[in-house]
Image: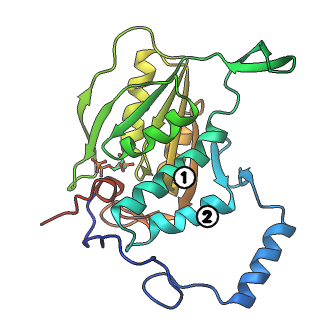
C-alpha cells in the first residue's frame, strides 16, 4: 500500500492541544467520557462484540486506545511510529498467547520451593515482510524462545492482490503454534495466503496478530478460517477505492521503514 503524503520527521511533541492534526476533546466532555468508561467496566479487557465473529478478539484497553492514536496520526514520525507499533504489539500479544500449554514446575526461591508453571509449546512467529518485521521484537520479548519464520508478500497496487516473493518455511516439523504478524489486514488477501501456507506446513494452531483490520477483510478471514484466531487493536469500517483501510493509518511498511512513495 502506498501513502500519498510524506510523513513528517520527529519534532516537537505531536498532539499539542489545538495544533496539528490531533484535536483534543474538551475537558468537560473528556471527564464525562472517563466516567462512562469506568462505569461500563471497559478498562483492561478484550472485547468480543456481538457483531464480531467468535474467532475475532478486539483488544480493548486505554493503552491500546492511546497508542492507536499515535500510529493513526499522519504527523507521527517513523521512530515514534515504530515505538507505538512495538507497544501495541506487546499489548495484543498478551491475549494472543492465552491458553498456551504450560507445565507445572517446582522452583526453589531464596526462601522455599514454589509451584510454578512454564510454557511448554513450540511457538513460531511468522512476520509478513515487510511491515510484520516491526512486530517481531515485542513478541520475542515476552516469548524469547519462539522461532521466527519469514514470508515476503506485497500487494500489487493495481489489483490489490498479494504477490509472494519470499518463502523459507521448511517442509517438515511445524511449530505447535504459529503467530502471524502483520500490522494491517485490509482485504485479507495476504493473510489468506499466509494461513493457507501455514496449513500446508501442517500448523494446527494459527493465530493472527494485527493492529488495524478492515471489517470486510477480517470478516472474510474469520469466515474462511473458523479455527484461526485473530487478535486486533482496531476494526475500521471500510476500504477505499485503492483498498486502503479507512480511516486506518496509511501504509504501515512505509511508515515503519521511512520509505514514502516518491512517485
Ligand atoms: C500491506 C500490509 C499487509 C497487506 C494488507 O503490505 O502490511 O501485508 O498490505 O493488505 P491485504 O489485507 O489487502 O492483503 P504492503 O503491500 O504495503 O507491503 P509492505 O509491508 O512491504 O509495505
Q: Residues within 10 Å of mark 2 (few under 14, many from 20)?
A: some
Figure check: 107 above or below 34: above
Figure check: 245 above or below 94: below
Q: Residue furthest left?
A: 263
Q: Residue furthest front?
A: 110
Expressed as whole percent of the image width and height from the top left, the position of residue 163 reads 24, 39
Question: In this rendering, would 68 be left or right of 48?
Answer: left
Figure check: 246 above or below 151: below
State the residue at coordinates (69%, 33%).
Answer: 98
Q: Is residue 224 visible?
A: no
Q: In this figure, which residue is indicated by the disc labeled 2? A: 65
State the residue at coordinates (19%, 63%).
Answer: 261
Residue 6 — which label? none
Question: Which of disc 1 and disc 2 is earlier in sequence?
Answer: 2
Label 1, secondary structure: give it: helix
Q: Is mark 2 within 8 Å of ligand 1?
A: no
Expressed as whole percent of the image width and height from the top left, the position of residue 123 reads 53, 22
State the residue at coordinates (41%, 53%).
Answer: 186
Q: Quadrant of the C terminus?
A: bottom left
Q: Which image quadrant is residue 198 in? A: top left
Expressed as whole percent of the image width and height from the top left, the position of residue 93 reads 59, 40
Q: Is residue 75 visible?
A: yes
State the residue at coordinates (56%, 29%).
Answer: 143
Label 2, secondary structure: give it: helix
Mark 2–mark 1 Cα distance, whole angstroms, equals 9 Å
Q: Quadrant of the N terminus?
A: bottom left
Pointers 2 and 1 in contact (C-beta within 8 Å): no
Expressed as whole percent of the image width and height from the top left, the position of residue 241 reads 32, 66
Q: Nearer the viewer, residue 180 or 54?
A: 180
Q: In this figure, which residue is indicated by the disc labeled 1? A: 88
Amino acid at each position: 500500500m502506498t501513502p500519498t503524503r510524506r510523513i513528517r520527521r520527529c519534532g516537537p511533541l505531536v498532539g499539542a492541544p489545538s495544533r496539528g492534526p490531533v484535536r483534543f476533546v474538551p475537558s468537560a466532555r473528556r471527564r464525562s467520557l472517563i466516567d462512562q468508561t469506568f462505569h461500563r467496566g471497559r478498562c483492561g479487557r478484550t472485547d468480543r462484540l456481538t457483531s464480531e465473529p467468535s474467532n475475532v478478539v478486539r483488544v480493548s484497553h486505554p493503552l491500546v486506545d492511546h497508542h492507536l492514536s499515535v500510529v493513526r496520526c499522519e504527523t507521527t514520525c517513523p521512530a515514534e511510529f515504530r515505538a507505538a507499533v512495538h507497544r501495541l504489539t506487546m499489548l495484543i500479544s498478551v491475549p494472543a498467547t492465552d491458553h498456551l500449554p504450560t507445565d507445572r514446575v517446582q522452583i526453589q526461591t531464596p526462601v522455599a520451593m514454589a509451584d510454578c508453571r512454564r510454557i511448554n509449546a513450540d511457538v513460531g512467529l511468522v512476520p509478513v515482510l515487510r511491515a510484520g518485521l516491526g512486530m517481531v521484537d515485542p513478541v520475542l520479548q515476552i516469548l524469547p524462545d519462539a522461532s521466527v519464520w519469514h514470508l515476503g508478500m506485497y500487494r500489487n497496487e493495481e489489483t490489490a492482490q498479494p504477490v509472494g516473493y519470499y518463502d523459507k518455511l521448511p517442509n517438515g516439523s511445524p511449530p505447535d503454534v504459529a503467530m502471524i504478524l502483520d500490522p494491517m489486514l485490509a482485504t485479507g488477501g495476504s493473510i489468506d495466503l499466509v494461513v493457507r501456507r501455514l496449513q500446508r506446513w501442517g500448523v494446527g494452531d494459527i493465530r493472527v496478530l494485527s493492529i488495524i483490520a478492515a471489517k470486510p477483510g477480517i470478516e472474510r478471514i474469520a469466515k474462511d478460517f473458523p479455527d484461526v484466531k485473530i487478535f486486533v487493536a482496531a476494526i475500521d469500517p471500510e476500504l477505499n477505492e485503492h483498498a486502503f483501510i479507512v480511516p486506518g493509518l496509511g501504509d504501515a511498511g512505509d511508515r515503519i521503514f521511512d520509505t514514502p512513495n516518491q512517485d
